Amino acid sequence: MSRFNLRPLPGGESDSHAGADERHLNRRQFLRYGFNAAGGVLAASLGALGFASLIMPGSSGGSGELVVKYWAKGREDEAWYGAMHLKTMQKSHFVEQAAKSKTGMSGAQGVWNGLPVNITYVPNSKNAGTALVSNKPRFQLMDGYDVGGKYVGHFEEMQEKDPRLFPSEDIIMVFSRCTHLCCIPGWQLVENNFTADNWTSGGTDDGGSKMFCICHSSRFDPTALEMNKNRNRTNGTMFTYAGIRRAGGPAPVGLPIIPVAINGDIIEGITDYLDWLTYCD
Ligand code: FES
C-alpha cells in the first residue's frame, strides 16, 4: 500500500509524540482524509498568500456572508460531504452523519468568509450530564496555558463575557490554520493512536476525534475549550482568545473558535472576533 511522508519539522525538530508509523499515512487514509494534503500543504507553500485568497478571491474576511459552505475539493468521492462541495452547511447533515459514527460525532472542512474553517458536531446536549470517565463526547471547559506554560485563564471567563462563545446547538467552528506554520488541519485526518475512533476527556492525545495537521503532525481537540493567547503577526500584539486545545505536536497553542448561530438549520458564523484570526497574516 502506498504511504506518504509527512513533512519533516523545520530545523530537524522532532515530535516526541509521533512514532515512525504515525509520520506516514497510507493511500486510503490520504484519500479519505486528504483535505490537508491538498489544502494544507498548498497553503504552507504559498505562505502569506495562503489558501483563503485562492478559493474566494475578493473576499475581505470582513462583514461578508455569514453562512458556512462545505469544502471538499479534490476529495468529492471520499468525504461524506463530497457531493456538497460549496453547498451551505446545515446542522442536520452533521447529526445524520454523526449517527453513523462510533462516537456520535462528525466533522467537516468548510469555508466561511473566504477563510478555511473546521466544523465539528459534538453530542454535548445528550452527554453533558454523564461522568467524564464514561468517555461520552462532550465539551469540556478548561484552564488555558500559553506557550510558556503560564496560566492564561479559564474558558468560562470568556463565556461569561460573551455566552455566544460556547458552541451553539452542539456545533463548534474553529479557524483552520495551524498555529505552528499555518497549514490547514483536518478533522480525523489520520487513523492512528491519536485519532482512533473513540473519545476521551482531558484534551490530550488519548482517544481520537482530533483535528490533525498533516504538515508536522499537530493535533487539536475540538471538544476541549480553553482561554489562550497568541500573537497578531500584523501588529505584533498579543491577544487573548477562546479556542480549542492543542493536544500534541509542534503547534504552540490551540485554534481560535469562531462562534456560530444556528439559523433554522443553517450554520452561520459570527464576525465579532476576526482579530483572533490574524496570526497567519
Ligand atoms: S503547520 Fe506544522 S504542524 Fe501544522
Image: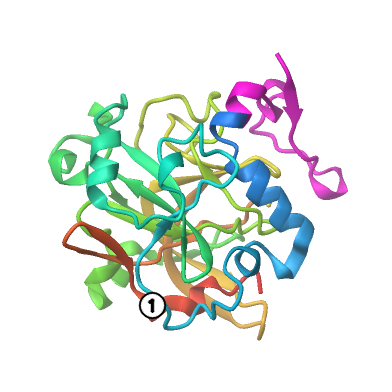
In depth, the one of 226 and 60 nearer the eye is 60
Q: Where residue 110 sits in the image (x, y, percent)?
A: 46, 55
Q: Report the residue that reaches farthest toward the right.
A: 11
Bounds of the magenta segment: 1-30
Query: How many numbered marks appear?
Result: 1
Residue bearing the label numbered 1: 271
Q: Looking at the image, which residue is at 41% across and 35% down?
A: 80
Q: Point out residue 50 in the picture as x, y percentages from the top left corner.
A: 68, 64
Q: Residue at x 66, y 54 (%)?
A: 183
Q: How is the image coloured?
A: rainbow
Residue 102 in sight here: yes
Residue 79 higher or lower than 278, as above or below:
above
Is residue 259 rendered to the left or right of residue 194?
left
Near-viewer residue (175 or 201): 175
Judge whether residue 169 is colored magenta.
no
Q: Is residue 6 magenta?
A: yes
Is 131 in front, or is 275? 275
- Circle 1 packing at 10 Å, graded few (<14), some (14-19), many (20+), is some
